[in-house]
């Protein structure tokens, strides 16, 4: 799954469906990001994964704001597929993000 296929998946949806997909993706990504936590401890074993997840969520929330306010300036929404695909990132976040997006698409299609 690359940026183009993710964008096509998003583009076929109306605004409400996009919001639901991004909300579902965001929730799934937070679940996947838990892999960064130290097992049964208070620490973090994978800080890069946690930081990258947070950066993606920053963009997701802004894209949701743009959708819900019907903004004319949709910078975050127009680039969200790039953030979800995690091109040029470490494998942990690539795997987590793509799996979260696939799960979100599946949940939204059922």
Image (spheres, rainbow, N blue to C red):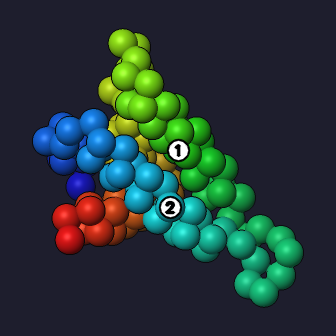
Left or right of residue 1: residue 24 = right
Residue drawn 44% across and 25% down?
69
Q: Is residue 69 above or below residue 101?
A: above
Residue 87 found in image quarter: top left
Q: Which residue is mark 2?
A: 27
Q: Is residue 49 above or below residue 40?
A: above
Left or right: where 40 falls relative to 11: right
Residue 24 image position (x, y, % from top left): 41, 59
Frontmost of labels 1 and 2 is 2
Residue 15 lies left or right of residue 36; in this view the side is: left
Give the residue at the far right of this rendering: 42
Q: Position of residue 15 (x, y in %)?
A: 27, 36
Spot the residue most to the top.
Answer: 72
Distance from label 1 to label 2 (Cα)?
Answer: 12 Å
Q: Can you identify the residue that label 1 sits on?
A: 56
Is residue 3 something one can see in this rendering? no
Q: Is residue 53 visible?
A: yes
User: Who is closer to the viewer here, 75 or 42?
Assistant: 75
Residue 7, how many percent across, how many down?
23, 40
- Give 59 or 3, whichever is nearer the viewer: 59
The residue positioned 41% from the left and 57% from the top of the image is: 25
Q: Secondary structure at mark 1?
A: helix
Residue 3, image x, y percentages: 27, 42
Task: Say which label, 1 or 2, has the lower sequence index.
Answer: 2
Residue at x 52% of width, y 44% of height: 56
Label 2 element class:
helix
Residue 88 is drawn in which quadrant?
A: top left
Left or right, 25 with reference to 57: left
- Circle 1 residues within 10 Å: few <14, some 14–19, many ≥20: some
* Residue at 39%, 49% in the rendered image: 22
């Amino acid at each position: 799954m690359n940026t183009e296929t993710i964008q096509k998946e998003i583009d076929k949806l109306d605004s409400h469906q996009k919001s639901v997909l991004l909300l579902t993706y965001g929730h799934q990504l937070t679940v996947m990001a838990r892999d960064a936590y130290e097992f049964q401890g208070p620490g973090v074993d994978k800080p890069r994964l946690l930081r990258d997840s947070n950066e993606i969520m920053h963009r997701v929330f802004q894209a949701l704001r743009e959708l819900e306010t019907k903004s004319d300036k949709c910078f975050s929404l127009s680039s969200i597929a790039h953030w979800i695909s995690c091109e040029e990132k470490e494998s942990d976040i690539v795997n987590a993000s793509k799996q979260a997006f696939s799960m979100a698409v599946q949940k939204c299609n059922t």
